[in-house]
Image (cartoon, helix red, strand yellow):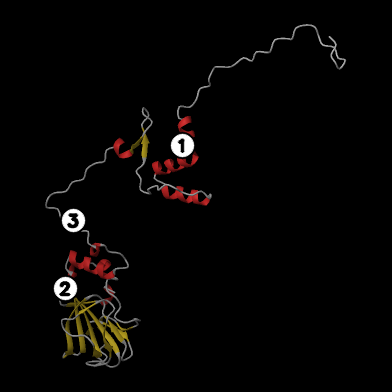
């Protein structure tokens, strides 16, 4: 057939339209895929953080990426396990039962702060040391470092033990304490917390003398003082100023004579300092 524009049209009937085969076979899908799509990536991250107990780290990570955290995830959430049958989170404590701890009815439990002893708490160490046993039973290894220095700077002038007497010049003189160099008027400090049991004149050569009782048989004495600022019955703490050094009593010059007494007997102070 001739078209108006001069083109020929085929006289045969038009071909039938092509039939497109429709595939009806579905691919296997993950049963949790739709659930994850509905939750979205942000909620998946927060749920994982809550289940694994890393809420704080997840929050930091989300903040670093510019996302706004809209849910509160507890940092102390229990670790969650997954039930294979129902695919639901189960607390770990429900999976593994925790053992029960019991105590006898008469048991004494002490949670007081004073029972905690550290290197930064020397008075606590001394208190614990003396509460466990008498001062006379404490070993040198345990006692060293339990008392503080009676002066800001310690420089030995005469050691504990037998020596030549600086007053008579005779040999065999037993020195009952440790002499430390100190100009007259130097602050004398309490070696540990305790109660002042004597503050006055010592008639046997100590001059102005202060005695502090630290409990359970342990005492410290401070001798040849020019003056003292404490009185009997007063409670003092480690490092408190008790007096000023001097040269009163049987003394040949300004210094501090420091003694440590255990159950009334003098011992070498270096075993406690």
141 with respect to 81 (left or right): left
Q: Is residue 166 visible?
A: yes
Of badges 3 and 2, nearer the viewer stands 3
- Badge 3 is on which residue? 109
Q: Is residue 242 above or below residue 105?
A: below
Upstream in sequence: badge 3 or badge 2: 3
Residue 25: x %, y % from top left: 54, 17
Distance (Cα) linking label 3 and label 2? 27 Å
Q: Badge 1: few (under 14), some or many (20 or more) residues near its Cα, within 10 Å?
A: few
Q: Please name the residue shown 18% across and 81% down the image.
A: 234
Q: Secondary structure at mark 1?
A: helix
- Residue position marked by numbered label 2 in the rendering: 217
Q: Residue at x 68, y 13 (%)?
A: 18
Which mark is first along the chain, 2 or 1?
Answer: 1
Q: Residues within 10 Å of mark 3 (few under 14, many from 20)?
A: few
Q: Which mark is residue 39?
A: 1
């Amino acid at each position: 057939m001739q078209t108006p524009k001069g083109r020929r049209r085929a006289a045969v009937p038009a071909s039938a339209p092509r039939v497109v085969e429709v595939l009806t076979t579905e691919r296997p899908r993950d049963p949790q895929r739709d659930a994850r799509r509905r939750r979205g990536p942000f909620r998946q991250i927060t749920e994982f953080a809550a289940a694994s107990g890393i809420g704080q780290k997840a929050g930091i990570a989300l903040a670093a990426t510019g996302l706004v955290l809209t849910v509160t995830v507890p940092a102390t959430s229990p670790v969650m396990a997954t039930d294979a049958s129902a695919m639901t989170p189960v607390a770990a404590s429900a999976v593994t039962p925790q053992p029960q701890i019991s105590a006898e009815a008469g048991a004494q439990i002490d949670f007081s702060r004073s029972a905690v002893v550290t290197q930064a708490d020397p008075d606590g160490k001394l208190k614990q040391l003396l509460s466990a046993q008498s001062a006379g039973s404490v070993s040198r290894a345990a006692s060293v470092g339990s008392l503080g220095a009676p002066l800001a700077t310690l420089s030995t002038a005469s050691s504990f033990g037998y020596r030549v007497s600086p007053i008579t010049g005779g040999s065999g003189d037993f020195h009952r304490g440790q002499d430390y160099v100190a100009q007259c008027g130097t602050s004398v400090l309490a070696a540990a917390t305790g109660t002042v049991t004597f503050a006055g004149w010592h008639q046997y050569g100590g001059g102005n003398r202060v005695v502090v009782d630290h409990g359970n048989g342990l005492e410290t004495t401070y001798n040849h003082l020019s003056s003292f600022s404490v009185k009997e019955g007063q409670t003092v703490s480690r490092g408190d100023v008790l007096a000023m050094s001097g040269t009163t009593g049987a003394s040949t010059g300004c210094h501090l004579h420091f003694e440590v007494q255990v159950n009334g007997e003098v011992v070498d102070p270096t075993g406690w300092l």
